Amino acid sequence: MTAMAIEDYLAQGGRLTSPGNVPPRYRGEVLRLMAAFVDSELAASAGFADVINDAPGITSRIAAARIVLEKADHAGRVLTVMADFGADTSRYVGTHPWAARLPRDADIGAARQGGDMRLAVFHYPLAGWADAVVMNVLQGAAAVIQLQDYARLSYQPLAEVFRAILPREERHAELGRAGLAQLVAADAGAVRAALAYWHPRVALGFGPKDSARLGLHQRLGLRHRGNAEMLDDWQRTVTAQLDTLGLRPE
């Protein structure tokens, strides 16, 4: 089967099961997708590790520690698939500043920074427990929507990994919402300030509505839903979640 024939097959909903029969362009794009996920999970894990001791009580500390552990585990699972593709995974063995953040008032839009592929939102620092919980609620909802799409991608071994990760990320989002309900009663002002800060930054993670790479990913079966469609889904989801607490996106 030629590379073009494989792409036609993928565009029609076909699935691949081995890195040995993928065309070069597919290999490059799936590796890029995996690197962005791995780096974002590692950066998220490192960021939440810094706020564990800010958690108000043992239950909240356990929830934060669970998120830290499982996000690192998710990165490891996808890294195994990257290794199957022959990716150089040695840079994940040594130290890397996953906890590094830009100044709070930095304005980088959706642009990636530094030497990794994390989403831009993970370059911003968490300013205490309330801020971390709000960020987790918003980014957690985004992660679930994105993983629902990734769980259907055309490289079956990776899709299976994402399907296993999805319920755990859903649980992370649930933990965030439980923490947020407690915070609203204690300090609604801090919650609203955090919403105003994080809402636009998380929204940028869905990418531009007219992304050329999105079209390529859809043809290769690596994506199914458009950026604008998923952003709208996220807006509806978080609006409904916040509304139950008497809040609204800022």
Image (cartoon, grey):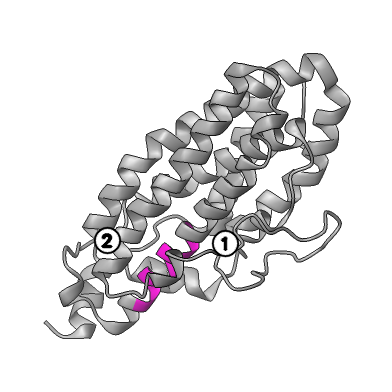
Q: Which residue is mark 1?
A: 118
Question: What kind of residue is marked 2?
Answer: Ser
Query: Of helix, strand and loop, which one carries label 1?
Result: loop
Q: Position of residue 1 (x, y in %)?
A: 11, 82
Give the dominant element type of the magenta stretch: helix, strand or loop: helix
Q: Quadrant of residue 164?
A: top left
- On screen, residue 103 versus residue 177, left or right, reads right
Q: Measured along the vertical axis of the image, is residue 88 above or below residue 183?
A: below
Q: Position of residue 191 (x, y in %)?
A: 80, 29
Query: Of helix, strand and loop, which one carries label 2?
Result: loop
Q: Which residue is mark 2?
A: 154
Instruction: Determine the residue positioned at 80% across, 38% down.
Output: 194
Instruction: Determine the residue positioned at 84% across, 22% down.
Output: 188
Kindly identify which numbered label has been placed on residue 98.
Answer: none
Question: What kind of residue is marked 1?
Answer: Arg
Does the stretch in magenta take in 36?
A: yes
Residue bounds of the magenta highlight = 28-37
Q: Nearer the viewer, residue 190 or 97?
A: 97
Q: Position of residue 142 (x, y in %)?
A: 56, 44
